[in-house]
């Protein structure tokens, strides 16, 4: 890819702020309705932590996420992408759970002629190319694929189209696992997005006996794959699954994790520290970030997610 190329992800993509800044990854916003307020999720960690502490994401508050409008996306493409880059790879949250993919594709198509005119006025006659890829993943799963895009861009061996083809081949290998802290959000808010991981009966029994579902996002499908007794056991389950996959071999040398709260609460856990040490010894990069507000609205504060691409 050329030097004037970049990766853009929507704000639901879980990656550490330092990683996003280091690699100049552009953030496509997602709109949030929380109580009577309307916010734009741009993965600002300070603002996200403030929201967590304000308790506005708790059960008593109405909250939902929705993709930025086509007009908002068009404005973003012109101001943040087309003026500074010739090639853009936009990697979006699963199209089965959000309209972000559809809105970006339509905006890029509708605005292509006007963008050409804008660039020509700036003295740039190079055609602007934007390729939109549906990650078929959520949150940390999207982060795994974004990590690979950046790795390939830094190597500089593949063209724009070759990177897209490679990422398309890895989508079916990417698994995102999640353990919720509260079942309320999966039963009520995530269900509105097409997630049926928690039924009414599972919700009642889970609350009575502290049973947590392990939810997997894989090939665009989100479903429970196991049940554990207690949140701590859920975290152990996720680390064990990741270690087993690493032993068998990963398709991408990274494990991406996110926490719907202050990540330091996870970093202080002995089990996390042990996991990170083992992962690094095997040449795998561990990345932990705060979960996006978009993600937390749907799965609830305190949720922990982990993703990798098995081979």
Image (tube, rainbow, N blue to C red):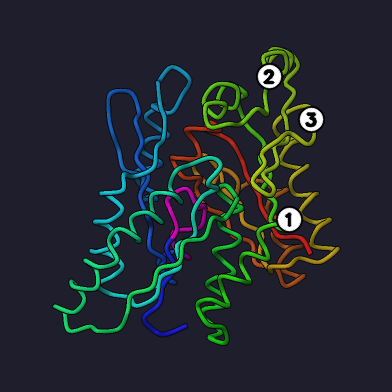
Query: Earlier along the polypeptide chain: callout 3 or callout 2?
Result: 2
Q: Where is mark 2, residue-wise? A: 199
Query: What is the CA distance from the residue labelled 3 to the residue labelled 2?
Result: 13 Å
Element under disc 1: helix
Is residue 18 a member of the stretch shown in magenta?
Answer: yes
Quadrant (top left, top right, bottom left, bottom right) of the C terminus: bottom right
* Residue at 31% across, 67% down: 81
Element under disc 2: loop
Foreground residue among 114 and 64: 114
Is residue 207 a member of the stretch shown in magenta?
Answer: no
* Residue at 53% across, 86% down: 156
Residue 281, x across and y down, in percent: 75, 70
Span highlighted in magenta in the image: 9-19
Position of 119 relative to 181 (above/below): below
Q: Nearer the viewer, mark 2 or mark 1?
A: 2
For label 3, the crowd category at 10 Å Cα-Cα, with few meaning under 14, some 14 to 19 and many 20 or more, is some
Q: Where is mark 1, residue-wise? A: 275
Q: Where is mark 3, residue-wise? A: 227
Query: What is the CA distance from the residue labelled 1 to the residue labelled 3?
Result: 21 Å
Q: Nearer the viewer, mark 1 or mark 3?
A: 3
Q: Quadrant of residue 78?
A: bottom left
């Amino acid at each position: 890819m050329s030097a004037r190329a970049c990766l853009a992800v929507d704000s639901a993509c879980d990656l550490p702020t330092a990683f996003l800044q280091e690699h100049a990854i552009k953030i496509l916003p997602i709109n949030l309705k929380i109580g009577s307020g309307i916010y734009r999720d741009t993965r600002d960690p300070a603002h996200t932590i403030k929201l967590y502490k304000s308790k506005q994401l708790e059960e008593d508050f109405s909250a939902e996420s929705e993709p930025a409008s086509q007009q908002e996306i068009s404005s973003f493409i012109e101001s943040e992408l087309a003026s500074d880059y010739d090639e853009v790879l936009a990697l979006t949250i699963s199209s089965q759970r959000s309209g972000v993919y559809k809105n970006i594709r339509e905006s890029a198509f509708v605005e292509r002629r006007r963008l050409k005119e804008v660039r020509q006025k700036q003295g740039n006659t190079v055609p602007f190319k934007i390729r939109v890829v549906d990650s078929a993943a959520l949150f940390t799963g999207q982060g795994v694929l974004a990590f690979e895009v950046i790795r390939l861009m830094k190597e500089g061996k593949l063209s724009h189209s070759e990177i897209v083809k490679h990422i398309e081949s890895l989508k079916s290998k990417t698994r995102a696992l999640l353990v919720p802290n509260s079942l309320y959000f999966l039963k009520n808010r995530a269900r509105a997005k097409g997630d049926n991981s928690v039924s009414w009966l599972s919700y009642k029994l889970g609350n009575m006996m502290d049973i947590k579902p392990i939810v997997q996002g894989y090939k665009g499908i989100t479903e429970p794959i196991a049940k554990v007794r207690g949140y701590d056991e859920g975290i152990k389950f996720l680390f064990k699954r990741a270690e087993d996959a690493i032993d068998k071999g990963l398709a991408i040398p990274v494990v991406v994790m996110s926490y719907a709260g202050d990540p330091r609460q996870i970093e202080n856990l002995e089990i996390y520290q042990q996991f990170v040490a083992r992962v690094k010894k095997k040449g795998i990069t561990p990345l932990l970030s705060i979960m996006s507000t978009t993600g937390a609205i749907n799965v609830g504060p305190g949720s922990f997610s982990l993703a990798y691409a098995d081979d």
